[in-house]
Image: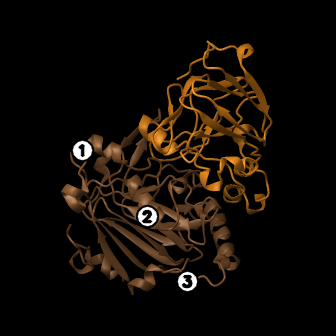
Amino acid sequence: MTDHSPDSSPTPSATHAHGLRYETLIDGGKHWSFNVRAGTLLRLTDLTGGANVGMLFYNPANTLERYNAPDTLKCQHTFKLTRGHCLYSDMGRIFCSIIEDTHGWHDTVCGNSTKSAIAQRWGERSYQEFRNDWTQNGHDAFLVEAGKYGLGRRDLAANVNWFSKVAAAADGTLTFDAGYAKAGAQVGLRFEMDTLVLLHTCPHPLDSAASYPRKPVTVGFSEAEPVAADDFCKNFRPENGRGFANTELYRFCGCAALPAGAPEPAHTRGAAS
Amino acid sequence: MKQSSTLSPSTASFTRRIPAGDYWIHPVKQGERLRIVDVEGNQAADTLFYNAADPFDRYSAVDTIRAQRNVYLSTGSKLLSTSGQVLAEIVADTVGRHDTLGGACATESNTVRYALEKRTMHACRDSYVLALQEHDELGLGKRDLAHNINFFMNVPVTPEGGLTFADGVSGPGQYVELRAAMDIIVLISNCPQLNNPCNAYNPTPLDVLIWDGDVS
């Protein structure tokens, strides 16, 4: 495995111009997790085109509140995710808003690659033989990260697959559009609540590339601009205005949900600065 | 694909009417047939399935639609669990298309979809939670309420990536029939939604029937 420090990563210079507090490179087929505070901007970059970033979201103060793809889609009458959309929890609140997107279409209905599906498509590469160039799968990646917070298979839900376009034909047939990938594509998420984020960079489950796609992404953090009255996401649909109202009420009077005496959760921003 | 069943209601071993706003939770043995009937038409049957031997392994909408490469459910659809096992297969369907993208209504999502002041109206997710509270012998809770099937609901996806809530393609007496591929637990919320034109703002009853595996 190549160890990439932020300085050696092939980061677009424009990214640094936006003043990220911290940026790191995650190779394809890896996983990570972290807490982000409300007001954080998380920016993902598909460096070479064709990356897939699986992502799940939980409320760290009550992990029973989690990302709900059906609510996210039906509240905004959409099948794809792109700029303007908000990612909803099952409690009618917004984990984050997609405030930047140069890709244009992200999937949230196809779930994850699995160990057996990857072995079937590309053959299994064991850790023993290939070290960290083994063929990790999205399902196991999420199980590992979820377990670090006391979560397990019961807590996995439909995830986002950033940078992966899957379209449905009139008869409902799903097609993974490999040609839609763009080197340098970026998506920026502004967090509206404190959120636990699980992510992996394993291949999209419908990717039929000739060999296991091992596509790197950068993950960067900065402080988001405050939400203005004319915010694009908040005003994207009337539903989002109500989602923001629910979230603002929670932030106003509900954030003391951490048990008394509990230590402050370790926030990534603090650790990275 | 539309396909009618050869089974007669007179040979069913179990029949039950589920009023709108109620839940129904029931075991179905491997090989048994379960029919859900849309009695008055365009009524959503919000349905979840659990592996009876391992209830943490439950119906997975994403695994099901990915495996069949299609967002709609109909005759021939195999309903997969999170671990990839077949829980049940749709063996008859007089409607032709059912939704598994839209999830269940919840009091909280109703505030977003309709108005903040709708927060105290009854919703499917509350029926689900009550079902699991009243059947705590199963050891299940809110985390086990995954994305469900909406039998009889029509939620077309557009090629441009939109999601539409179209008029129902179901009608009075239409039904869907499943064959259990293993011992399963079925949990249905008969949707109480009063804000959605899909059911003409009028939730109506569902019937469920079960046939033993050896009945033809």
Per the image, the residue denoted by label 3 is: A264
Q: Are marks 1 and 3 on the same chain?
A: yes
Q: Are marks 2 and 1 on the same chain?
A: yes
- Amino acid type of disc 3? Glu
Residue B30 x %, y %: 57, 27
- Amino acid type of disc 2? Glu
Q: Is residue B93 above or below residue A44?
A: above
Work out whether mark 1 precedes mark 3 in sequence or the reverse, and give the earlier one: 1
Q: Is residue A74 above or below residue B66?
A: below
In this rendering, position of residue A225 left or right of residue A9: right
Per the image, the residue denoted by label 2 is: A145
The 10 Å Cα crowd at callout 1, few under 14, some 14 to 19, many 20 or more, is some
Indicate the secondary structure of the residue bearing disc 3.
loop
- Amino acid type of disc 1? Gly
Work out whether mark 2 precedes mark 3 in sequence or the reverse, and give the earlier one: 2
Give the colour of chain B: orange
The quadrant in which residue A243 appears is: bottom right
Indicate the secondary structure of the residue bearing disc 1.
loop
Work out whether mark 2 precedes mark 1 in sequence or the reverse, and give the earlier one: 1
**Relative to the observer, which residue lies in front, B190 or B53?**
B53
